[in-house]
Image (tube, rainbow, N blue to C red):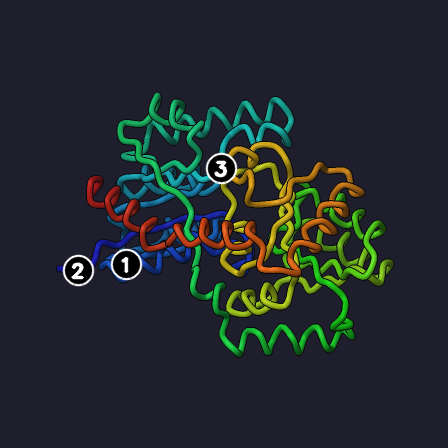
């Protein structure tokens, strides 16, 4: 019997930025599924629709992937599973009201069409269960061992790159790893550099604000921009850093789990994450001066093996991609 063939349409993000879906897909392949993973663009959508082998099911990740997945489901005659990873409230805070209303309607339509919905944020349960016939909770995972104990090759790659940039080993490094979009308060992050002394703000990632970060790095000697780096080298950069930064108003973010697994103390934007991470991270506002204050405060505590560090590492160790993949395996089995 051939392996069930699953098309998975994900957000069109750089491969080194958005890794969660690839981790789940890898585990599903180990469990006997054939996964065709594609970032959602018009080109990949055309390729999927032209695929002659067909699919046993399609998974669509919010937001574009779910809408495209609905089209594939209709055209290919296969069941749709919506991988609902982002709350609509997050989108509504940055989009215009008419656009947000259209997106909400489209999401509701994909829920209604879907054979099943996997959701991450508890606040999305009511909306998903209102429209979908089958709803199941899932979560995030982290490659804990890879970040907790980075390979010598990853550490060497990071150290060599920083040496090429002539970063003083005595300087402390505050690292931001991830997407460079307005929702992550990149401008405020860059602004914090002027309030920091003896710190290097290391920005690793890609996105629409990459040009802005590059200019800031040229203008400010305490900012270094690496762009996107190979995912296998990321643990090495976290190993040489002193503080991890996450300025998105979100309580479910992979960044914090990766920072925690790496043993980094974390600066996190106050807001939705406070209930989940209180006592585990240092919170700050979007004021650049307050971001700098939080970095300095967290850096002082990182001189010792702090209680916060151990607590966050222990928290991160509870999350595993294999467990998350089991949620998707269960949904696929039900749908198929």
Image depth: mark 1 or mark 3 in front: 3
Counting residues from the start of the chain, the first of labels 1 and 3 encountered is 1
Q: Residue furthest left?
A: 1
In this rendering, position of residue 15 left or right of residue 244: left
Q: Secondary structure at mark 2?
A: loop
The numbered disc on residue 309 is none
Q: Secondary structure at mark 1?
A: strand
Instruction: Mark 2 and mark 1 in contact? Answer it, CB < 8 Å.
Output: yes
Residue at point 32%, 27% (across, down): 132
Find residue 205 and report its horizontal and vertical position in percent: 63, 57
**Dot 3 corresponds to which residue?**
86
Residue at point 53%, 25% (across, down): 102
Find residue 137 and report its horizontal and vertical position in percent: 34, 36
Residue at point 66%, 50% (across, down): 180
Q: Secondary structure at mark 3?
A: loop
Find residue 319 and report its horizontal and vertical position in percent: 40, 51
Alpha carbon of mark 3 to alpha carbon of mark 2: how far? Answer: 33 Å
Alpha carbon of mark 2 to alpha carbon of mark 1: how far? Answer: 9 Å
**Dot 1 corresponds to which residue?**
34
323 vs 275, nearest the viewer: 275
**Dot 2 corresponds to which residue?**
2
Occupied quadrant, residue 127: top left
Alpha carbon of mark 1 to alpha carbon of mark 3: how far? Answer: 25 Å
Counting residues from the start of the chain, the first of labels 3 and 2 encountered is 2
Image depth: mark 3 or mark 2 in front: 3
In this rendering, position of residue 200 left or right of residue 84: right
């Amino acid at each position: 019997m051939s392996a069930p063939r699953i098309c998975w349409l994900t957000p069109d993000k750089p491969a080194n930025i958005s890794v969660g879906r690839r981790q789940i897909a890898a585990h599903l392949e180990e469990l006997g599924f054939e996964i065709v993973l594609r970032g959602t663009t018009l080109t990949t959508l055309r390729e999927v629709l032209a695929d002659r082998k067909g699919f046993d099911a399609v998974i669509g990740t919010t937001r574009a992937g779910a809408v495209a997945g609905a089209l594939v489901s209709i055209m290919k005659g296969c069941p749709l599973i919506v991988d609902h990873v982002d709350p609509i409230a997050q989108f509504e805070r940055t989009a215009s009201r008419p656009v947000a209303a259209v997106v909400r309607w489209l999401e509701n339509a994909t829920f209604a069409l879907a054979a099943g919905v996997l959701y991450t944020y508890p606040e999305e349960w009511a909306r998903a269960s209102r429209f979908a016939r089958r709803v199941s909770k899932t979560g995030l995972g982290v490659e804990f061992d890879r970040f907790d104990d980075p390979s010598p090759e990853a550490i060497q790659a990071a150290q060599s790159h920083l040496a090429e940039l002539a970063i003083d080993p005595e300087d402390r490094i505050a690292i931001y790893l991830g997407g460079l979009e307005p929702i992550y308060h990149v401008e405020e992050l860059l602004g914090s550099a002027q309030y920091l002394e003896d710190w290097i703000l290391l920005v690793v990632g890609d996105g629409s604000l990459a040009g802005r970060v590059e200019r800031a790095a040229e203008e400010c000697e305490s900012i270094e921009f690496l762009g996107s780096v190979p995912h296998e080298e990321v643990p090495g950069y976290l190993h040489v850093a002193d503080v991890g930064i996450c300025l998105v108003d979100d309580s479910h973010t992979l960044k914090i789990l990766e920072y925690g697994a790496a043993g980094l103390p974390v600066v996190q934007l106050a807001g939705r994450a406070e209930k989940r991470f209180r006592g585990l991270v240092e919170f700050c506002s979007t004021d650049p001066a307050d971001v700098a204050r939080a970095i300095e405060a967290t850096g002082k505590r990182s001189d010792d093996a702090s209680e916060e560090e151990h607590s966050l590492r222990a928290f991160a160790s509870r999350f595993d991609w294999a467990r998350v993949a089991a949620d998707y395996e269960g949904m696929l089995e039900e749908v198929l």
